[in-house]
Amino acid sequence: MEQGRIAITHAGESLAEAILEKLTESGLDHESIVLLGDESKVGVKLAFGGSYLAVEDQHEFDYSNCSLVLLTQHDDEIASKLKSESALVLSHVHGDGQALIYAASNNAELDISYTQQNIQLVSAELACLMDVLPALHAHTAISTINTTFLRSVESKGKAGVDELAGQTVELLNGRDITPAVYPLQIAFNIIPTTSIPAFNDDLARLLGDNNNIECAHQIIDVPVFHGLGVAVQLSFQSNVDLKQCEKILKKLDNVVCTTTASSPITDCNQSFNCTISGLEQALNQPNKLQFWLVADPLRYGLTSNYVNVVDILLKSFL
């Protein structure tokens, strides 16, 4: 095993590209990075740190030659191969039920996941809440969390983006469409979807209070290409001061708090920050707070966590 060598699967896809972009800030040498992709990407050269890396075949690659593998999309064939080769895997889509990791919240649990050779990261949706909610909870204990996620087709990868684009063209030209990625027409439509398994329990646990916080969430797929919007309603165990909460949020890294309307495209497109607007006390009740959060879920939600966990692993484990 080559110390510190990192393989990134599904090179050329949106998440892998964002991770590669962010890793250029880490000071890693280009020789420590291996880019892997499907047959259509093999041989393609992608820029990294002033050099160009050629994509190799992710299904033929010998993963035992790497210290760490970032599995950036769901792929049962690669996941099975990684188990047989005993590679250390970092992924937000493949795991064996162990604790979900968010770098800023539960680094200590990396010890167990590292031993199991499988580190499962939180979902994009959950990650987008993990700067804001812990800060508010540390100030005044939260008792209930209700969230509604408006999720773009980017959550389904290139296939989701292509389906929305294709359906839009077909419908505008008066032609019938056949949904493939989504169960219903997504263009010019809104589709409620199933909740994320264990999301509510995971959120409460990451806040360190899974016995005293009640959580509920809804996910709605909307016909926009990129970004994520979240309507958040919180109840606290005691009254909170609105201006104090605003001060707390404004002090957070990677969080922008504004009094003007915000949207994923105008405020957070390809950004590693989230933006909060509409902060107010819900229904004039002093123990309730609500706000609107927008983010680029691939960059702010997933990429930042991948890269932060990689940094911890390289410094403390690999």
Image (tube, grey):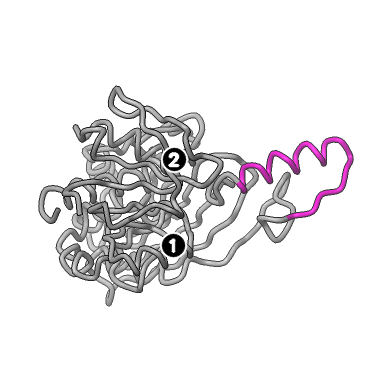
Q: Residue at x 19, y 49 (%)?
A: 2
Q: Please state which of residues 67 and 269 is positioned toward the viewer in this rendering.
A: 67
**From which residue to which does the magenta span run?**
159-179
Inter-mark Cα distance, 2 to 1 = 21 Å
Q: Residue at x 41, y 30 (%)?
A: 46
* Dot 2 alpha-carbon crowd within 10 angstroms: few under 14, some 14 to 19, many 20 or more: many
Horizontally, residue 13 falls left or right of residue 288, namely right
Query: For the point 57% across and 67% down, which residue is it?
Result: 194
Residue 26, position as x, y percentages in the image: 21, 35
Q: Residue at x 21, y 38 (%)?
A: 251
Decide which of tag 2 and tag 1 comes sooner along the chain. Answer: 1
Pinpoint residue 20: horizontal percent, then vertical percent. 35, 37
Residue 146, numbered label: 1
Q: Nearer the viewer, residue 270 or 83?
A: 83
Give neighbour class at mark 1: few <14, some 14-19, many 20+ (Cα, 10 Å).
some
Front position in the image: 178 or 135: 178
- Count of all numbered marks drawn on residues in the image: 2
